[in-house]
Amino acid sequence: MAVPFFLGDAKTRACLRIPGGWRGFSRVRALATAWLWLGCVMPAWADAPAGHAAPAPAASAGAGDEGHPGPSATPDLSVLTAQLARASSRAAAVDLEVRLERARRHALSPTTRLLQRGAVAHLAEGKALSAVEDLDDALVLQPDIAILWRDRAQARLAARDLTGAIADLGVALQHDGQDAVAWRLLSAIEEQRGDWQAAERAWQRVMALDPMVEGGRAKGEQLHLKAFGRPT
């Protein structure tokens, strides 16, 4: 089974190379220095989600779309999560999934974002252990950001460290139990471990949070059949 890829499309990401040591705090300091230098030239689209166009320049005050607050607004995860659970079409769900991913990364610092992009690039290159190291450093900086634990779980899964991936997802879901993508990743890992009942339970959580997820009902029936030997 293919490893799910939730971190983003590395084709749009730049991975900065810093000569010298890359481990631990020395690596973090090097990246921080690099970010300060890049700050004056980094294009505005650098933080745009992969696969989506950069936002247009902000319109004058009062002209914004109330349903899509500006990038400086603090996203309300509970509101977006509730909207996703009530989505009536796949197109509406996709829009909310993208907005939730953006909201969950809203509080990332510039250096953490640079490390996360490095992890995306390393995963795309098949360098899963390097991606894990990138995310180790990111978690040193911001251990309270749930999505970073989910990101490292994905990197550990790619590195075939299923135990470490499940441990990271446990932390991620403890911080943010409404993250449908984390439950989806947990289901995929349990499927690889052959624990079909655990995989089916995790998928039920996915369906509760994101009923319009692509292939959701068919996947749930497949997992239920493998877990219990009978159709739903």
Image: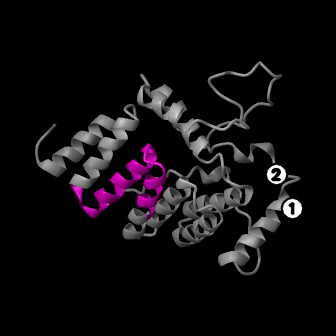
Numbered tag placed on residue 87 in the rendering: none
* Horizontal side of residue 230 vs 159, given as left or right: left
Q: Where is 57 relative to 228, above or below?
A: above
* Horizontal side of residue 217 vs 181, given as left or right: left
Q: Of label 2 and label 1, which has the lower sequence position? A: 1
Cα distance, mark 2 to mark 1? 9 Å
Task: Give the quarter of the image for residue 130.
Answer: bottom right
Tell me the residue at 28%/63% (across/down). 193
Give the colouring mode of the picture.
Answer: one colour
Q: Is residue 214 visible?
A: no
Numbered disc 1: secondary structure: helix
The residue identified by callout 1 is 37
Q: Where is 145 relative to 141, above or below?
A: above
Q: Quadrant of the N terminus?
A: bottom left
Task: Give the quarter of the image for residue 211.
Answer: top left
Tell me the residue at 18%/50% (across/down). 226
Numbered tag placed on residue 42 in the rendering: 2
* Nearest to the observer: residue 176 or residue 85: 176
Numbered disc 2: secondary structure: loop
Residue found at the far top of this picture: 63
Tell me the magenta residue range.
168-196
